[in-house]
Amino acid sequence: MLYPSVPEEQGEFLNRAAFECEMAYPIDPRTQIPLPRVRAEAQYQHLVNTVAPCVEGLGIAVSDPPSLTTWLEAYYAETEIWDPYSDLLEQVTAGSSLLDEAYAQCPHDAPDLYPPIG
């Protein structure tokens, strides 16, 4: 999540809002660490073979994916990686029903990407 720049006198309010949001909608900690290579490769294949065609089926142009090697290098370098959802978000406005449809029909994460907790 990226927070906007705000005047210094509003910084405390932004920090409070961010804290309240993070407490109300906690992030799964498993999503905050790099995936092991096998799972990262599975995610890449899912993005290429499932998500991209699904997003294109909704009428959104998706850029060509890089090679697996290039994608993995970017992923582990924690730089911007190819993702069909990036193309989707560039072409659809927030609040669009198409965006909701994509989230419902084109699950971003590969099945079983994260092992169960417990």
Image: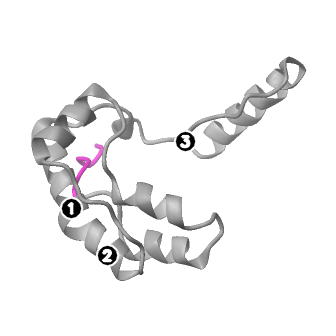
The magenta stretch spans which residues? 112-118
Instruction: Tell me whether the residue at label 2 lies in contact with that at label 1, contact meaning CB atoms closer than 8 angstroms.
Output: no
What label does residue 26 carry, if any? 3
Count neighbours of disc 1 (C-alpha within 10 A) and say few if under 14, some if 14 to 19, many if 20 or more.
some
Count neighbours of disc 3 (C-alpha within 10 A) and say few if under 14, some if 14 to 19, many if 20 or more.
few
Q: Earlier in the sequence, mark 2 or mark 3?
A: 3
Q: Earlier in the sequence, mark 2 or mark 1?
A: 1
The picture places residue 77, in percent across and down from the top left corner, at 27, 26
- The residue under label 2 is 54
- The residue under label 1 is 48
- Amino acid at dot 1: Val
The picture places residue 45, in percent across and down from the top left corner, at 15, 57
What label does residue 89 carry, if any? none
Whether the magenta-drawn stretch holds residue 10 is answered as no
Q: Is residue 111 visible?
A: no
| Alpha carbons under labels 3 and 1: distance apart | 28 Å
Q: Would you say 38 lies left or right of 65 here? A: left
Picture layout, residue 86 above or below residue 16: below
- Amino acid at dot 2: Cys
Q: Earlier in the sequence, mark 3 or mark 1?
A: 3
The picture places residue 64, in percent across and down from the top left corner, at 24, 59
